[in-house]
Amino acid sequence: MNVELSLNSGQITAELLDTLILPRFANGRASLSVEFLCRQKTDASVQQDRLRLPALSWFDANLLQSFTKQLALATRLENCQVELPDAGLRLIGLSGRDRVLPADARAIRVEPLTTAPRQFAPFVLKGTQADIRTYARKLYNRLWEAFCRG
């Protein structure tokens, strides 16, 4: 799997190493903590970072998994979008052949909703269709593990 994470309009890119999903319990409610483990290569060194999403409800997690699967299986020009209301996120999926991406590329733009309590700079996950398909399977497995544990 070779998925790239771009921040600040593509000025900073990092290799996505893994996605960590852990059950959380706060205020009597169950939610999920989602973190992207990344490796950023600079001229002099390699730096590892974690990028954390706002906490997801199980409903949001289901929408995230369905969205990722839909984008991974898209075979022609299909752009999709979903809002995760509990987390305050909007996911915009772009498939290739839309003049922005190569034919076999996929991109997922993650941005906050205007009503979200936690605002952050949008970022983009990019990869080939095969990479996004592998990522979708990994995401499904991680969500299933979190569901079984929590």
Image (tube, rainbow, N blue to C red):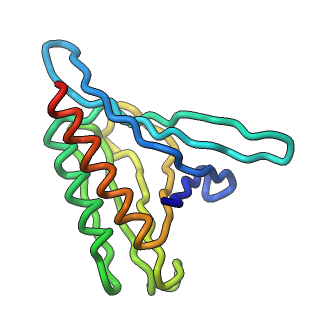
Q: In this view, does 17 lie to the left or right of 29?
A: right
Query: Which residue is farthest right?
Result: 44
Residue 41 drawn above or below residue 129: above
Foreground: 9 or 19? 19
Quadrant of the image occupied by residue 94: bottom left
With 106 as the anchor, is 23 left or right in this view? left
In this rendering, the answer to whether 114 lies above or below 52 is: below
**Residue 32 x/y as whole percent:** 26, 31
**Residue 60 image point, x, y percent:** 20, 43
Q: Which residue is drawn at 61% across and 57% down?
A: 9
Count all numbered tags in the image, as a single digit. Answer: 0
Q: In this view, does 36 lie above or below 1?
A: above
Q: At which x and y percent is residue 103? A: 48, 85
Which quadrant is home to the C terminus?
top left
Tell me: residue 113, above or below residue 136: above
Question: Which residue is rendered at x = 46% and y = 80% of the image?
Answer: 104
Q: Which residue is drawn at 62% across and 50% down?
A: 14
Q: Farthest residue toward the top?
A: 27
Q: Which residue is drawn at 25% across and 21% down?
A: 24
Task: Place residue 27 in its image quadrant.
Answer: top left
Residue 26 at what x, y percent from top left? Answer: 22, 15
